[in-house]
Amino acid sequence: MSVQARIVDGPLDPQAPEASPGSGAVLRFEGVVRPVEPQGPGGAPRELAALHYETYDPMAERSLAALATEMLARHRVHAIRVLHSRGRVSAGAISFTLEVRAAHRAEAIAALTEFIDRMKRDVPIWKRPVWR
Amino acid sequence: MSDRETARFRVLLFGPARERASADHVLVDAPVGTACAGLLQAMGAQHPALAFVLPAARLAVNHALAPADRVPDPGDEIALIALVDGG
């Protein structure tokens, strides 16, 4: 059972999950900056050049690690690896990756979904649109 | 008349709160012994520009989310955690 959590400057690289003997389910979620976003709640769609991510350090990285540890225990998954960008990430690039390894898909999917919901609520990371 | 001593707290700002306040922190005066919930109320009264984020905001004390009844020390590192983004 293992946890890795890191904040990384700039966009993330697409990578295949590492081999994980003993895990029947390996999920990798990639969060990609959308090229078009509404300008404000309910606003008209507008082209986006990038998102700028601001983190409260070191709380952001610590919070990701604590959340991963909690999800590991709650959902009985084997490993969680999470990376999140800080700074500018262009539209179409990856700003967040979450890998979950588990014996079966049900607990892997549950852990992934709850992790992302909780991250948006509890981890001090803010994004600011950079419009075209 | 209350004789409770007043303390000054420095609260770090991020994201939309920092943009709205045009500052990376605000100073908040509150009686010594004020808990986080009271500190948020005092912040709203003393810095009305931040009122829009306070209903969903929490405080972090020394890099950990603090419960509403936590009593911070003026020397603690206090941050306003107001996550208003969608996914």
Image (cartoon, coloured by chain):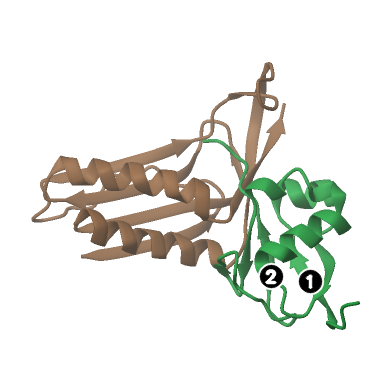
Chain colours: A brown, B green
* Mark found first going from the N terminus, 1 or 2: 1
Horizontal and vertical percent position of residue A87: 63, 50
Please tell me which residue is depicted at 70% across the width and 35% down the height of the picture: A130
Please tell me which residue is depicted at 26% across the width and 43% down the height of the picture: A110
* Residue assigned mark 1: B10
**Taking B38 as reference, is A28 left or right?**
left
Image mark 1: chain: B
Horizontal and vertical percent position of residue A2: 25, 65
Please tell me which residue is depicted at 87% across the width and 83% down the height of the picture: B3
Q: SS of the residue at dot 2?
A: strand
Q: Amino acid at mark 2?
A: Ile
The answer to which quarter of the image holds residue A27 is top left
**Taking A93 as reference, is A50 left or right?**
right
Q: Nearer the viewer, residue A97 or A121?
A: A121
Please tell me which residue is depicted at 51% across the width and 54% down the height of the picture: A122
The answer to which quarter of the image holds residue A43 is top right
**Callout 1 and callout 2 share a chain:** yes
Label 1 neighbour load within 10 Å: few <14, some 14-19, many 20+ = some
The answer to which quarter of the image holds residue A80 is bottom left
Q: SS of the residue at dot 1?
A: strand
Does A9 appear above or below A26? Answer: below
* Residue assigned mark 2: B78
Does B34 appear above or below A36? Answer: below
Q: Nearer the viewer, residue A75 or A86?
A: A75
Q: Amino acid at mark 1?
A: Arg
Q: Which residue sits furthest right?
A: B1
Q: Quadrant of the N terminus of chain A?
A: bottom left
**Taking B49 as reference, is B72 left or right?**
left
- Is residue B7 among the parts visible in the rendering? yes
Q: Quadrant of the C terminus of chain A?
A: top right
Q: Nearer the viewer, residue A72 or A55?
A: A72
Circles 1, 2 touching at the beta carbon (< 8 Å) = yes
